[in-house]
Image (spheres, rainbow, N blue to C red):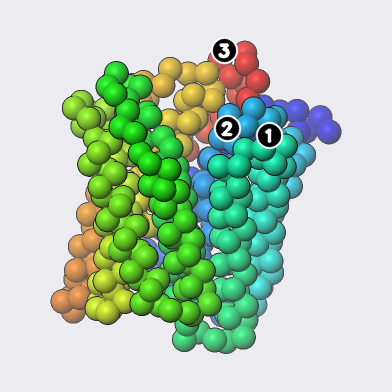
Amino acid sequence: MKFFQHPVWAMAFRPLYPLSALYGALSVLLWGFGYQGTGSMPGYFWHAHEMIWGYSGAVAVAFLLTAVATWTGRPPVGRERLGILVGLWLLARIFAFIPDASLISGLFGTAFYWTSAYFMWESVYAAQSKRNYIAVGALILFGFTLAIFHTRLSLGNTAVLKNNLFAGLVMMAGFIGLIGSRIIAFFTSRRLNTPQPASPQWALVAPLALPMLMAFLMSLQLALPLAALLGIACGILGLVQTIRWWAKGTAKEPLLWTLHAGYAATSIGLIIMGIGQWFHPLLSMGVHLIAVGGIGLLTISMMTRTALGHTGRPLYPAPKSMPVAFWFMVGALFFRTLAAIMLIVGQGTAYQHSLRCSAALFAVSLLLYAWRYGPWLMRPRLDGKPG
């Protein structure tokens, strides 16, 4: 079809990065300023559902389906196949707003992740890229966490839904672990012309494998203390790796320090979430260190970096507006952490103000990305290459 010959359908990052940025800004503003969801997916459940499986999941799929072409040398997922994925994602978002249609949203959302897994599997299997099989499995499991959430939601089993939401969030932490362990040390070394620290294979697999096992246990409500210990172990490993990957000059390059900071925030969040299994008031802080510090900061940094490379633009420095967007996301993390503290000490008014400040800063950060990158992603590469 001629419609799918447009450059926006060349690779997964082109439509999904700006769509997810715009939707992430919209959904976090709605939640921060009073939207209460629908009768079948109210308030907190709607907010967490859309930020985990709506915004951040779309960014993860966009990155993986873009990167897999480089990892395997196979043609990228594009054109009509990409159109199917975008359609599934959009339908999942639309039905999340319709009363009594949350189950339909879940069906489309699960189909989005499992279809993405199938498209990725085609490439890695054809190339016999065995080290990427785990990424395919992670996409399948991510869809599974969504399916389990909607199954329990439709049955009215709300008592355990928080753990199902946490399972989806932990899977996003796993995707951060996968992506970070592959690119942070490499990008840092290339940019600063420093030796790249070597890591044993288990240390490159564990940042995804441990969260996968943790999410599986949480989804099925099994051995939750063990799941917590897995999160703590993964977080400690992540902090060790972050320290090892840091090099002199990293703090001066926005496209580097944001990756390191996002990875470290995710690691700390996993540790605090794990401790929260025994001290529940800490859970909110751990969750939002992952959600805002990890997912928020690392996704906007990765969207900036990968879109520069794949549109034929210089990788450094970051476009002028993007360091500002990064600091807005750091501000969002500060206020969301403050909100978690206010919740612990029982300061309800301060909690609401901090929550709204965080939501506004998170949204502005994503809107700056969409404003700067949206037009670039609609046009062919500057260097004339495909992609």
Describe the element under mark 1 as helix, strand or loop: loop
Which quadrant of the structure image shows residue 320? top left
Amino acid type assigned to the residue bearing label 1 in the image: Ala
Q: CA distance from mark 2 to mark 1?
A: 9 Å
Tell me which label, 1 or 3, sits earlier in the chain.
1
Report the quarter where the N terminus lies: top right
- Residue at 35 percent across and 71 percent down: it is 228
Tell me which label, 2 or 1, sits earlier in the chain.
2
Give the label on residue 127, or none. Answer: 1
- Residue at 29 percent across and 18 percent down: it is 193
Residue 191 image offset from top left, x and y in percent = 33, 22
- Residue at 48 percent across and 73 percent down: it is 217
Looking at the picture, tell me which residue is in the foreground, 360 or 344: 344
Find out whether the residues at labels 3 and 2 contact each other: C-beta distance under 8 Å.
no
User: Mark 3 = which residue?
Assistant: 383
Give the label on residue 71, or none. Answer: 2
Looking at the picture, tell me which residue is in the foreground, 248 or 168: 248
Q: CA distance from mark 3 to mark 2?
A: 21 Å
Find out whether the residues at labels 2 and 1 contact each other: C-beta distance under 8 Å.
yes
Q: Residues within 10 Å of mark 2 (few under 14, many from 20)?
A: some
Describe the element under mark 3 as helix, strand or loop: loop
